[in-house]
Image (spheres, helix red, strand yellow):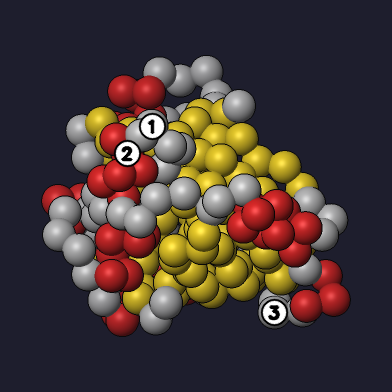
Amino acid sequence: MGREIEIKIPLTDAEYEKIFNVISSKERLAGVEVASDSLEHLFKSDSYFSRYATREESKAAGEPQVIRIRSEAPDGDKTNERSYFCIKRKTIENGIELNREDETFVEKPEVVRDLLLLSGYHQFFEKNKDAYGVHCQSEVLPGCDFHLELEMVNGLKYIEVEVTDGADSADDVRQALEKFMEKFGLDTSKRDKRSWMEIIRGSAV
C-alpha cells in the first residue's frame, strides 16, 4: 500500500500548450528539471464500480472511494494495452488529495468485471484520459520525484502532479506541490478539490 499526495488544476488552452512545450523539451523552465526520456503518451480508460446507488450511501457504508479497472494503451496501441484493478481510499487535507492505494496487474480485466457484477457491484462512472506523463525534479523539494500528467479528461484540460511515497513529510510535499505548480505560472487557488466523477458531472466542490 502506497502513499499518494497529488494536486490538480484546470488549464486554459494557452497554459496547456506552455506546459506541453516544457515537458516535451521544446522550452526550459527555471527551477524544474524534466526527465525527457521518461515522457509517455498514454490513453487510459477507467471503469468505476460501487454497490450503492449514490456516493452518499457509499461513503456512509464505508466503501472505498475508488474501486476501479484501468486499461492503459501507450500511444493508443491496443496491442500493448495493460489493465489493472485498484482500490483507493481517499481523503482531502488542506485542499490536496492524500490517497492510500492498492493496485495489481490483471491479465483479463473482463473476468474481474464479471466478478464485480456477480457480487452486487455496478459500473456507475467511466473516465477517458489522453495524457502525457513525465517525471520531474525541482528545487522546491530537492530529491523528490514529481510525476506530472498533462491531460485531457473527457475533453477537459488539466494538469495533475503527484508524489508517491518518499521520505519527505506529507506537509513538506503538499507545500512543494503548490510551489511546483507556481513554477509553471499557475494559480494554486484554482486547484480542483473534487473527484473526477464530480468534475465530469459538473458537481459542486
Label 2–label 3 contact, CB within 8 A? no
Q: CA distance from mark 2 to mark 3?
A: 34 Å
Q: Quadrant of residue 29?
A: bottom left
Residue on which disc 3 sits = 76
With respect to residue 149, does 90 lie above or below? above
Across and down, in percent, residue 171 comes to 31, 23
Camera-side residue of 120 and 8? 120
Q: Nearer the viewer, mark 2 or mark 3?
A: 2
Q: Is residue 107 left or right of residue 22?
A: right
For disc 1, the marked residue is 62
Which residue occupies the foreground of this view, 47 or 141? 47
Question: Given the image, on which type of amino acid does mark 2 rest?
Answer: Lys
Residue beneath disc 2:
59
Residue 58, horizontal then vertical, whole percent: 36, 43
User: Left or right: 7 with respect to 188?
Assistant: right
76 on left or right of 143: right
